Amino acid sequence: MINLLPPDYKRSMSLEEKLIITVIISAIVSAMIIGGSFHYRLVSANNLLEEQISMAEGRLNQINHQVREINYLERKIREAKEEIEARDDSLGRDLNWILVLDEFRRIVPEDSWVESFEVSNKVFNLRGYTLNQGSLNKIINNLRGSNSFEGIRLVSSNKRNVSYTGFREEETFYFEIVGRVADVRGGLL
């Protein structure tokens, strides 16, 4: 059939064609709305999961830090226990240190002072100062007469000038004495 109508003349659509176009457009719009809604829910769920993962990673980092701290503290406790056991082994568990130190307090005269008192492998090393030679002799005699100390030996003694803040400079005798710590009941460790 030949169309004799001019080209700018448009034919009107039938009701059936309008209905089909409306259904197609409605289907496309519905699909876009449903797809957009589905996409929005996926993005929201993804953002929520990323937030939860971020929080979980932060908490995991805190837990890892706490685990490292706990491991460090456990190692320090283990080292301290080993050190205590080593000291107990070298000093003897039965030694009554309160009695030893109480007697030690009586051995050192008032015009003398102790710089250090170290005990290792049953041997003690006493370093300190005294104001005169007589006090040093008294310390040595007191140590030798004590039941808590044995094998007393003067390692060194020399004059030194000592001054502390707020006190005048004083000429003293620096001394170092070694010996063994004896069990208070009389036997050596």
Image (cartoon, rainbow, N blue to C red):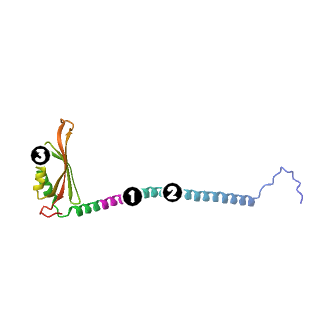
Name the element at disc 2. helix
Q: Which mark is residue 14?
A: none
Name the element at disc 1. helix
Q: Is residue 118 magenta?
A: no
Q: Indicate the quadrant where residue 130 lies.
A: top left
Q: Position of residue 68 (x, y in %)?
A: 39, 58
Question: Which one is in front, 90 or 125?
Answer: 125
Q: Which of pointers 3 and 1 indicates the residue nearer the eye?
A: 3
Q: CA distance from mark 2 to mark 3?
A: 79 Å
Left or right relative to 97: residue 48: right
Q: Position of residue 15 (x, y in %)?
A: 74, 59
Residue wearing tag 2: 50
Q: Which of pointers 2 and 3 indicates the residue nearer the eye?
A: 3
Q: Which residues are magenta?
A: 68-79
Quadrant where the C terminus lies? bottom left
Residue type beneath disc 1: Arg
Residue wearing tag 3: 135
Left or right relative to 170: residue 85: right
